Each structure stands twice: as structure tokens, then as C-alpha cells.
Amino acid sequence: LAQKFCIDLGYALQHPEVVHMLLLSPEWPKLITAFGILHGSHNLTRKVSRGHVVYEDTLWADAVHLELYVVSRLLPYLTSGFAAMLGVPAAGATPAAPAPEALPPPSPEQKSEICQAVFAPLLDAIARCAAHEAASRPEAFRTPVYDVGKYPVTCFIPLHRMFASLVGVALSTGVPTAAFCPPDAQVHASILQHPLRIAAAFAQVRHGMWKRNGRAPVDLSSFYHSPQWSGASLEQDHLAMQFAVAAHSPGTLVTTAALMFGLEELLAAPSSKTDCVKQLQSVSTLCEDFFRLVLQLVLERGQHGLEPWVQLRRRVVQCLCVHDCKYSEIESFLPQELGEDRDLVTACLEEVATFHEPQGLEAGFYRLRPALWVEYEPYFL
């Protein structure tokens, strides 16, 4: 039923005029409430006691499938229509949405009014979800930082991803942050919390701390970082964290993230150099993911606001920086909306790489042109 709703609503949202009416109408908060029903679906709690392990738990796939319908059918059209309302070129919003018709360019005052009308109910819904969670699990909020190794974590936060998608458009127009997000530390914390929990939980999964949960956390983490879903999940979460940290207090990020990752050792003064080395060795994987997250939040811009050709070229270059690739390997590295145009992918490969013909039983492969090695980004999402 939810999938049919997304498909039918997606057809209507292909028209920018409909998006304009929806975002400024009393129906907009109702749609956000409908999205809120999916918020927090399929919570995972780390198992620590001995007992039976369900290795093949695939219930998370149903939640992923449903959220992908929301993201692929609705968010591209909402983002593209919102961009048209603010006078942003359609191609800079999202490659998945059709080019909307031109609308009269709004004045700076009108842009601020539009952003306030669009973001106020969305931030209210995020705050209500946070308040509901605090009321249902008060013991989890008695400590300074939420313990992802002890309390439930969800990877499904459509409200945060809708906020990040729309923020990417609003920031590109030069609208003051105060016009769509109040300077409230509690609001910024509610935006930051869930994406940071996901990053910390998946770091623990990689560290081997969720083995008693079977394959579900590993498979979910792999899909979260895959090209098929990362554009709708990882990159949106990344932008939400960047916005919350920049708007609130960048200095608190390191302390909050270190505590959530379970790296209290980094914050405590070791008694000797030997103790420091032992502490870091015991949590080396967590440290690696923690520092990567901090560096990505500081250095990585993500794909927001980039033309489809720029997104494609950037991904292909980063893929070929890792190793020489066959066409099928490059294709698997691309999201569906970028990889489905084979002519565009071929043109991109001709620009950035040289093709080496097959030799004997070895397949042909592409190798990055030497002049493009300067474009390598070690913290590419």
C-alpha cells in the first residue's frame, strides 16, 4: 500500500506547480507525518548474551525496499520542485528528477518565507520523533551520549534525509541558515544524533562487536555503503551531520563522536606512552573509522549540487584511482541513475581513462590517465 502511494504521488509531483502548491499548503505537514511513520523502522540492538544466533535475518531488506521507494519516487521530485521555487537550476538539484519548468525568480525575502514554510513542519516532526524516543527509552538518555552498543539503533531516518536533501538546495541559494533552521542547540543535536549513531554502530559492526546478531548488521552496513543506496542514505546523512556541526558547535563533534564510538581512551590522559599504544591497538578499527568520519565531515563535499556529468566523472575517477577496472566493475560502482546511460558512461571513460585491449584470456580494462591522479580524494564517500 505504501509503495502504491509513493508511485501515485510521484506522478503528481513530476509537475513543479504541484510541488509548489504542496510545500506551501496545509497538506505538507500531513505528508511529513506520513513519512514519520517510517522513521525508526527495524531497530537493531546489539546482542551480548550467549544463545541462539539467527544468521539469516533479512527483515531489514523490507525496510530498505520501502524507504527506497520513498527516496526514489518522492524526494527527487520534491527537491527539484523546491529548487525551482528558489530559482535554482534544475540540473543542480538531482539527476533523478525531470527538469521542471521555469518559475519566476523569487526575491531574497520570498526565499526566506518559502524556506520557513517548508522547514518548520519538518523540524517539528524531527523534534517530535526525538521526544517520543526519549519518553519511550528514558534510561538511554541518562548518560551524556547515547550508547549504540546497548540501546536500539535504526538505519531508517527518512525525515533526516528529507531535511538534508532540501538543505542542500537551500544552502546553494544563499538563504541565511536562520531562515530555515533556528539557532537552537537542541534542534541541531536532534539532526546530528541519528546519523552519528549509524556511523558509530557500523564502525562497531566492522570491529566485530555485533557478531551475535548474525549477518543482518553486516549486510545492512554493506548495503548502506553501496552505490545502490549510499546516495539516498550515506550522503544525505553526511550532509545532515555537516550542517548540524557547522550550525551548532564544531568543537563538540570530536568529544561526542569519540564517546559514541566507545573511544573513551582517546579522551583520557594515558599514564604512559606504552598504555596509550595498547589502548589504541585494542580499538584500532574503531579509531580508523572515527578519524575517517571526522576527516570526511571536514574535507568531503559529497555529491550535492553537482551536475550529473560532474557526479559521474568524479565517481569514475575515484574508482580508477583504486585500481584498473573492467567496464562491469565501473558500472557496479555507479548508482542506477548515473549508470543507466551507457553512452554517457562511455564518453566519460574516453575522457578520463585509456582502454587496454584484451590479451589472451585476460579481459580488457580501463586505466586512469596519469594527469588525473591529482584528482584523487582519499576521503571520498
Image (cartoon, rainbow, N blue to C red):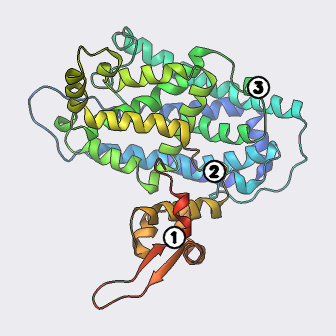
Q: Neighbour class for label 1 at 10 Å: few (<14), some, many (≥20)?
A: few
Total marks drawn?
3
Q: Amino acid at mark 2?
A: Pro
Instruction: Find numbered disc 1 in the image and state the secondary structure of the residue it sits on.
Output: helix
In this image, 43 relative to 336: left or right?
left
Decide which of tag 2 and tag 1 comes sooner along the chain.
2
In this image, 373 relative to 169: left or right?
left
Q: Which tag is nearer the camera, tag 2 or tag 1? A: 1
From mark 2 to mark 1, how far is it between C-alphas? Answer: 36 Å
List the residue tagged with mark 3.
Answer: 179
List the residue tagged with mark 2.
Answer: 76
Marks 3 & 2, CB-CB < 8 Å contact: no
Please state which of residues 214 and 69 is positioned toward the viewer in this rendering.
214
Decide which of tag 3 and tag 1 comes sooner along the chain.
3
- On screen, residue 315 above or below 27: below
Rendered residue at 64%/31% (across/down): 30
From mark 3 to mark 2, how far is it between C-alphas? Answer: 23 Å
Picture quadrant where residue 298 is located = top right
Rendered residue at 33%/45% (across/down): 220
Residue 234 image point, x, y percent: 47, 43
Residue 357 image point, x, y percent: 41, 88
Q: Going by the picture, which residue comes out furthest to the bottom?
A: 360
Q: Amino acid at mark 3?
A: Ala
In this image, 310 relative to 336: left or right?
right
- On screen, residue 181 above or below 240: above
Instruction: Find numbered disc 2 in the image and state the secondary structure of the residue it sits on.
Output: helix
Please state which of residues 175 and 32 is positioned toward the viewer in this rendering.
175
From mark 3 to mark 1, how far is it between C-alphas? Answer: 45 Å
Which circle marks residue 370 in the picture? 1
Decide which of tag 3 and tag 2 comes sooner along the chain.
2
- On screen, residue 124 above or below 300: above
